[in-house]
Every structure is written in structure tokens, then in C-alpha cells.
Amino acid sequence: MVDLVFLTQQFYIDHSQYPEILHKDDRPHVQVKININGALFCIPLRSNISHPYVLWTDKVNKYGLDFSKTVIIADINKYIDCINRPTIRQTEFNALRGKEYIIKSNLIKYINKYKKAKKNLNIPRNKLIVQYSSLQYFEKYI
């Protein structure tokens, strides 16, 4: 089962200096929580996505999991909201149901792409991948 969570306000306060971390004042982004090798990753569900680093939940309307805005959670108790449980559109839920392995595999591919891009920043495409990725703030965990 895909684990949907919200991040706490404290997460956004503690990471407010990082512009690529998504934050909405009016409502939080629903996140899919994934554990890889002991690290806890949260991938936001977004709309109006216009890049290829996505697992689409509704391609026509450009809804999906945005791997480029993935964050890593160092302190679950401090940064995962255990009180408020997110709900999502039924169509998105159906698109994610049973896809834990695919989500994890795609996230690993994205992390590897990020690491490769980081090694070759003289290539414009690679520079953009790193520049617009939230992983740049969590490199010690990947």
C-alpha cells in the first residue's frame, strides 16, 4: 500500500532557506513516503508538471509524483505529520495502488540520474537537473 503523508510545518520552517523544496501556505503537498536503504524519501504529488521526472497519475491533466522535488526525512517524529492523513483524487489513488515497486524503482533511477548529472555540470541539461532538484539539499543521504 502506498503510504501518503503530509510534512509538518516544522519541516518547512527548518528548510525554509531551500527554494526548490515545495511549500504552499494555503495547503500542504501530499507526499508518498518511500524507504530506500534506511533513508526515508517523500515524493510530492503535484499538478501542472512539465518535465520528464514524473510518475504520472493523470498525464492528460499533468498530475503525478514529481521526483525532482523529493526530500529526505532525517527525523520522522519531527517532520512527518502523524495526525492529519491526506486524501487524494480517486483516479490518482487508483493510478498509485500497487505501484510501490515502480515508485521505488523510478526514484532510484532519478537519484542515479541526479548523481550522474552532478558529476558533469558543464553540460547544460545536467546543470538544470541539479539546479531544480530538491536532492541538492540532501546529498549526504544519497
Image (cartoon, helix red, strand yellow):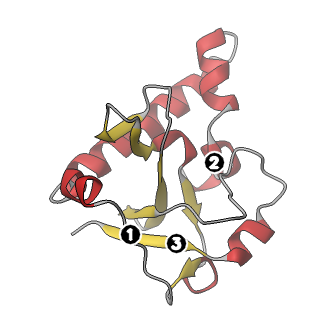
Q: Is 142 situated above or below 29?
A: above
Circle 2: residue type: Glu
Task: Determine the residue positioned at 50% across, 36% down.
Answer: 48
Q: Secondary structure at mark 3?
A: strand
- The answer to which image quadrant residue 56 occupies is top left
Q: Earlier in the sequence, mark 2 or mark 3?
A: 3
Task: Determine the residue positioned at 41% across, 35% down.
Answer: 62
Q: Position of residue 60 (x, y in %)?
A: 32, 31
Q: Secondary structure at mark 2?
A: helix
| Cα–Cα gap, marks 2 and 3 | 22 Å
Which quadrant holds the N terminus? bottom left
Q: Position of residue 103 (x, y in %)?
A: 29, 49
State if disc 1 and disc 2 touch (CB < 8 Å). Answer: no
Please give left or right for residue 17 compared with residue 75 in the image.
right
Please give left or right for residue 98 compared with residue 40 in the image.
left
- The answer to which image quadrant residue 131 occupies is top right
Circle 3: residue type: Phe
Where does label 3 land, which residue? 6
Q: Is 33 situated above or below 48?
A: below
Where does label 2 land, which residue? 139
Where does label 1 land, which residue? 4
